[in-house]
Every structure is written in C-alpha cells, then in structure tokens.
Image: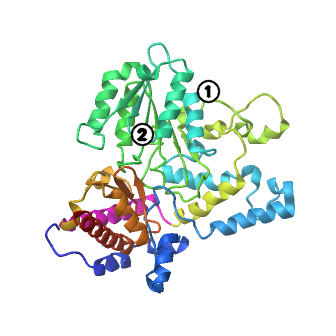
Amino acid sequence: MAGTALPTAQRASELDSRDQLRLLRNDFHIPKHPDFQDSCHATNKELDCQPIYLCGNSLGLQPKGTRALLLEELDVWADRGVHGHHNHPKSRPWIDIDECVSEEMAKIVGAHRSEVAIMGTLTSNLHFLMAAFYRPTDTRYKVIVEDKAFPSDYYAIESQVRWHGLNPSDAIISITPRPGQYTLNTSDIIEVIQEHGSSVAMILLPGVQYYTGQLFEIEKITKIAKASGITVGWDLAHAAGNVELSLHDWQVDFAAWCSYKYLNSGPGGIAGIFVHEARSEQGRLTGWWGHDRASRFKMENDFIPIPGAGGFQHSNPSVMATVCLLGSLRIFAKTTMRAIREKSVLLTGYMEELLLADEQTAKFYQIITPRNPSERGAQLSLLFKGGIMDAVFHKLELAGIIADKRDPDVIRVAPAPLYNSYEDVFNFSMKLREAILEVSQAVES
C-alpha cells in the first residue's frame, strides 16, 4: 500500500462487522487512562474519551464476570468459614478449587487434563520444574537459552546452574540473533543444538519472545532437541492464550506460564505448568497438595503423588486468584484457540498494513517483529529512530493509547483478539501518525 492514499475508518468498520468474536469485547472492562481523561474532560469532548487498550501482552483486561466470582467467594468465607472447603453453594469447594480451571486451561495449551496443574507463579514454577528436569551429569550439564530472554528466566536458569556447583559461563549457551537482526532464525537454534547436543542437558526457550513478539517454532525445535537426548522446556508467558499450542502432541517435556497477560487473570495471577504424561513420574520437589487427594488429610508422611502434573503441586492454591482465572476462562470457553488465533493474525496484519501504508511516518521506526504472521503472536514491536520514542509514547498516552514501552527505543503494541477491534487498530494508527508528526516537527524546528 506504500504510496497510496491513507486508509479510512470505513474499512475498519466493515472488518468489525464481519468479526465473529466482536461481541466478546462486551465481556471486558475497558480501563481509563488518567492523563487522557483529564485532558479529555477539560475540552468537554465526552464522546472522544474512549481510550484504546493495546497492552494485553503486559496485563490483560478484567473480565466483567470476575468481580461477581470474587464476591461469591468472599460471601462463602463470611457465611461458612472453614466449611467452604467442602460445602460450597456454588459447587466450587476450595479443597478442589483448581479443578474448576484445569480442564479449560488444558484445552488452551493443547494438553491432556492430567498434564496441567494450576499453581504458584511463573518463576517459582520454573524453579520447581527445573529442580525436576535439570539433572546435570559430568558429560551432560549445559543449558541452551535465548540471549534476550526475559531477565527473570535467565536469573532462574543461572541460579539453578550455580546451585549444582557449575559455572554459568561454561554451562549456559546463549543464542544471539545474527548481526543486524532482532529475532532468532530457527536454523541457528538447530545448529547450536546439533553442535552442542551431546553436552546439553536442557533447553529452555520462550514460546513467544516478549520484546520482539517472535513466535518460536516450538514443535520443530522440540523434535530436534529431543532427538539429541535433550530435555525440552518452554516459558509460555507470552504464548498461552495468544497462539495455538499442542504441548502433548509436540512431546514437550515441561512448560510454565503466567496467566495475567493474554489469559486475563489479573496482576500477579495464579500460574500454570505442563508436564508431559511420559515424564509424570519424574522426581520432583514435593508438597502436600501434590499428594493423593483421597488420602491427603490422613496426614501421613508417605507421599503418594497425584498422577500427572498434579503431583508437582505444593501448597493449596489461592481461591481468589483461581476464580479470577475462572472469570477469564469462561470467556475462552465461548470460542476456540483456533478462532482466536485466526482473528489475531488478521488484526495484527491489519495493523502492519496501516503502519506501512504511511510513508511519511513509517520512516521514523522499524517493525522488528517478524513479517510472517506464522512467526509472531499478537504483537508488533516498533523500534524508533532518532531518540524520539519517549516523546512519541507520551503523545500516545495523552491521546488515550494504552500501550507499552521498552527503553531505550521500542514501543510494543498488542491488539488482543478477545477484546480489541479493527477500529481500535485503525484509531491507534491515526494517533501514532499524529504523534510522530508532532514530535518530528518539534525536533526539526
């Protein structure tokens, strides 16, 4: 579209009218932006005071049903106290609270129900899983990671390596993008696996890279790594609820994810793990919630693990955090991950089309997310040139755009298919254009 007239709002409206998921937006609260609201009300433009939320890759929106679920649990606690564990008026006894979310969660990640457990938080779960699956020997002790992984992942891996008395500079193999590139080529990952395979104990990569939005070829990488005798784990923080996953069929050994991004469970929400049924007997750190449910309260010291991922649980999960996840999963249950992914590809593709259509402003940034839709999730990362990112981001905030930045020069924009519309994407592109023109003109003057 480069060199043509700028797009109009009419096409966005037409695309929204054909969107089979458009009504799901009504199931979410759209937050306000304080700075935007203040400036908006000051000009008495009430109809224009509609912020555009494009930050689902950082924190998903609150489902409208979540508040009622929380209030129900508070009422049970107030009215029944400890009896809520077994006698629950909403058929969600606290003693089995994770059961109300596990089945739907398994569908989202492509797993058997027994392969998924809802527990803890992401980094804690990664530690517990690595305690089970990272078993270095004298000959196999190295870990393959991505050099630009989310820092918390690297911290966890490095500390696990040190815990085993190993030197991270020797035991950690970090894969770095080629010079001048921002994403990793699958061929480069495979080359590292094949070069170091005999000395590698584990590989742990992100399903979707948080900074660039790159979607890794999970199935292909897993197959090649396992053929080399390597244990394969994935951090799916930015992938769960974002892209289609088939963890069981792909023979992934283990995976972990948070639920507050595309899964909309709220800040600090409860997380999840996957353990393939073929690895469910793996030795692990244990706790009483992983003990056989039927005999858990006998309080005996003979640990009998729940079959599957359930045996990796430790403490009873937070009831409040779990029902927050339930509020979101009830919306997921209205559709399928295939339908969500199909809309995501179209939505992100439409955004890319709009951004590239405007030659006047596109020269001020570079989209570092892969151009191929099959190689990215619901995110475009814009790398700004000339040190203007902060100024542009501030203009966007004042215009009611809620997005995310990563210093020094990247703005991440994530249209989430459950609640974002084509109109959102169109309006964002127009606001971005205005912001860039204002900032660039100020710089030039």
Query: What amino acid is at disc 1?
Result: Gly
Q: CA distance from mark 1 to mark 2?
A: 27 Å
Determine the secondary structure under disc 1. Answer: loop
The answer to whether residue 379 is visible is: no
Q: Main structural element of the magenta stretch: helix, strand or loop? A: helix
Q: Residue at x 40, y 47 (%)?
A: 208
In the displayed structure, would residue 68 be above or below residue 372?
below
Q: Nearer the viewer, residue 196 or 361?
A: 361
Determine if the magenta segment contains residue 337.
Answer: yes
The answer to whether residue 3 is visible is: yes
Boundaries of the magenta span: 335-359
Q: Going by the picture, which residue comes out furthest to the left?
A: 3
The residue that label 2 is drawn on is 149
Q: Residue at x 43, y 21 (%)?
A: 171
Question: Residue 223 appears at what percent x and percent y?
Answer: 37, 34
Q: Nearer the viewer, residue 214 or 225?
A: 214
Q: Residue at x 49, y 71 (%)?
A: 35
Query: What amino acid is at disc 2?
Result: Ala
Q: Which mark is residue 163?
A: none
The residue that label 1 is drawn on is 283
Residue 286 found in image quarter: top right
Determine if the magenta segment contains residue 241.
Answer: no
